[in-house]
Amino acid sequence: MAKKQKSFTDKIAKGTGVRGQVCPVCEQVIREIKVIRAARNEEKDSWRFLESVEKVCKCNEKEVLG
């Protein structure tokens, strides 16, 4: 039996959906961003950078970025 071919609109619809997780509270897509913070090392009197990947949506955007 022959395989049904997809139409052009079916192919376009496949790639236009929501990518990633959706926040249950604000219903926005959760983005993963890299946050770099500067931390002072008192022993060596120098600065170092702490990198972390955090998930951000409308709910916690001000706490993470602000």
Image: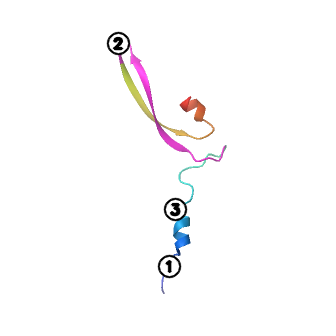
Q: Quick one: label 1, few (<14), some, or many (20+) residues within 10 Å?
A: few
Q: Nearer the viewer, mark 2 or mark 1?
A: 1
Q: Which residues are magenta?
A: 26-46
Q: Position of residue 36 (x, y in %)?
A: 44, 30
Q: Position of residue 4 (x, y in %)?
A: 51, 80
Asked whether residue 36 is drawn in magenta, I would say yes
Tell me the number on the disc at residue 15: 3
* Residue type at tag 3: Gly
Q: Position of residue 65 (x, y in %)?
A: 54, 31
Residue drawn at (56%, 49%) of the image: 21
Mark 2 and 1 residues: CB-CB less than 8 Å, in contact?
no
- Say what secondary structure mark 3 lies in: helix
- Say what secondary structure mark 1 lies in: loop
- Residue ID for mark 1: 5
* Residue type at tag 2: Glu
Q: Quick one: label 3, few (<14), some, or many (20+) residues within 10 Å?
A: few
Residue reaching furthest to the bottom: 1
Q: Quick one: label 2, few (<14), some, or many (20+) residues within 10 Å?
A: few
The mark nearer the N terminus, 2 or 3, is 3
Separation of disc 2 and disc 3 at Cα? 52 Å
The colour scheme used here is rainbow
- Residue ID for mark 2: 43
* Residue type at tag 1: Gln
Residue reaching furthest to the left: 44
Instruction: From this view, report whether residue 21 is shown above or below residue 39.
Output: below
Q: Nearer the viewer, mark 2 or mark 3?
A: 3
The answer to which quarter of the image holds residue 43 is top left
